[in-house]
Amino acid sequence: MDYPTKEEAAAAGWAIVEAFALIHGLGYENQGDRFMAFYQGGENDGLGALTIEVYDSNGQPAEL
């Protein structure tokens, strides 16, 4: 999906990962170049469940 600004794209990505994590009881964080929802505890502890990355119009990853 295209957004007018990097900030709007980042805000949308954060909202998606936050909602996903809360619905599924996962942890979530900004890793600097991506947003990640991850499992907490059990045999999958720390494994990513959803990753969202934001790219600029040149296809380069945006710093979040």
Image (cartoon, rainbow, N blue to C red):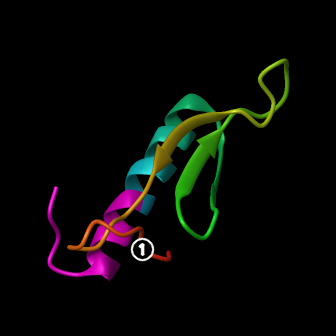
| Coordinates of residue 18 in the picture (x, y in percent) | 50, 52
5 or 42, nearer to the observer: 5
Q: Is residue 11 left or right of residue 18?
A: left
Tell me what residue is drawn at x 84 percent, y 28 percent: 41
Q: Is residue 39 left or right of residue 57?
A: right
| SS majority, magenta | helix
| Coordinates of residue 30 in the picture (x, y in percent) | 60, 64
Tell me what residue is drawn at x 85 percent, y 20 percent: 42
Question: Does 18 appear in magenta?
Answer: no
Which amino acid lies under the numbered mark 1 shown in the image of this protein?
A: Ala
| Coordinates of residue 50 in the picture (x, y in percent) | 51, 38
User: Vertically, is 29 above or below 24?
Assistant: below
User: Vertically, is 45 above or below 15?
Assistant: above
Q: Which residues are magenta?
A: 1-13
Which residue sits furthest top?
A: 43
Q: Is residue 55 left or right of residue 44?
A: left
Q: Secondary structure at mark 1?
A: loop
Question: Does 3 appear in magenta?
Answer: yes
From the image, tell me which residue sits under label 1.
Answer: 62
